[in-house]
Amino acid sequence: MSALEFEKPIFELESKIKELQVFSANKNIALEPELKKLTWKLEKMKSDIYSNLTPWQRVQIARHPERPFTLDYIRMLTSDFIELHGDRQFADDLAIVAGFARINGTKVMVMGHQKGRDTKQNLLRNFGCAHPEGYRKAMRLMLMAEKFGLPVVIFIDTPGAYPGVGAEERGQAQAIAENLRDMVDLKTPIVATIIGEGGSGGALGIGIADRVCILQHAYYSVISPEGCASILWRNAIKAPLAAEALKITAENLREFGVVDQIIPEPLGGAHHDADKTAAHLKETILKYIKELSSLPVPELLEQRYNKFRKIGAFLETPA
């Protein structure tokens, strides 16, 4: 498993413990007291490091290359997944995957951003950065879900919408804006979860939901820390400072009312125990689907509208 910079002391100690275990077995030398001390030291180190993560370290965990992606969660959470393709206007954007599925027998429309594990896959998936046809595909399938009375389950994991010339020529801003408008009025429950990166309009383009959840080490922000640092300080090296100022961690977002629930991750992040993370995620999704499905449609839409209208605050001072 790849180690982030701040995790290197943990990995070095784990390596030392493994070496001692192999040495003990090969030489038939009892080293249980030493191994016990080192194991205790390792657990304390993990607890100290992961309990005091900075916002920038959280961003690094959210971007970890071995972190579960949308298709991983679809595989772990659902059955009978049938992927659907295309926006019926231009093309099929592989940065967003979507289709019919069942979660514990409950029929849903599931969709989300998809990144790649290596260079070839990332080029295919455009690093999880959707084009306008991706957002139009997502909206087309959400309307299909509405037609058949299916809840919509969304996984958000993108640095942002693709900013290339072609995407802008095909109406990137309009596609996202139309999704914001139409998702507010979608007459079926929507549950969204930020599973990794939640970058700007690229995330918000499929992020209007009745319940917005976030994994413990994911982040959700109007701009990436690097982008913010480049604008404010003219230097991307200031990204850690920007991450602190942006208040993008799960706890910040819950405090501000941007997200409804923080879903816990195993010590070190979701990639350390993907099955456990998926179990927590499934439990949360099913809970909210059951809760929202019991609401009359007018009440569902009113609650969704009010949820987003109340986000944000401002102060007025006398002139």
Image: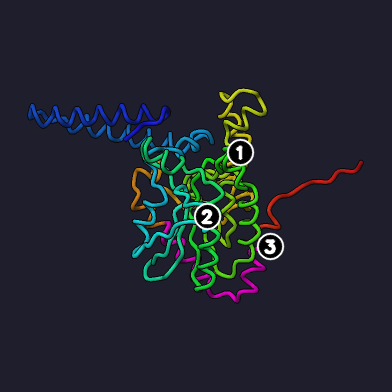
Which numbered tag is attached to residue 223?
Answer: 1
N-terminal of the pair, mark 3 or mark 2, is: 2
Q: Are there few (<14), some (14-19), or many (20+) residues within 10 Å of tag 3? A: few
Location of the N terminus by quadrant is: top left
Q: Position of residue 313 (x, y in %)?
A: 73, 49
Residue 169: quadrant of the picture: top right
Identify the element where label 2 is drawn.
strand
**Reading the chain from its start, which is encountered first: label 1 or label 3?**
1
Q: Mark 1, residues whose alpha carbon is within 10 Å: few (<14), some, or many (≥20)?
A: some
The CA distance from mark 2 to mark 1 is: 19 Å
Spatial CA distance of label 3 from label 2 is 17 Å
Mark positioned earlier in the residue sequence (2 or 1): 2
Mark 2 surroundings within 10 Å by alpha-carbon count, few (fewer than 14), some (14 through 19), many (20 or more) = many
Residue topped by disc 2: 213
Q: Which mark is residue 313?
A: none
Tag 3 residue:
306
Q: On the picture, is 17 further left or further right than 72?
A: left
Front-lying residue, 294 or 37: 294
Dominant SS of magenta comes to helix
Locate residue 240, reporting x and y percent.
56, 29
User: Mark 2 or 1, which is nearer the eye?
Assistant: 1
Q: Nearer the viewer, residue 307 or 129?
A: 129
Helix, strand or loop for disc 3? helix
Q: Is residue 295 magenta?
A: yes
Q: Amino acid at mark 3?
A: Asn
Region rendered in magenta: 281-306
As for residue 149 lying within the magenta part, the answer is no
319 w.r.t. 156: above or below: above
Q: CA distance from mark 1 to mark 3?
A: 24 Å
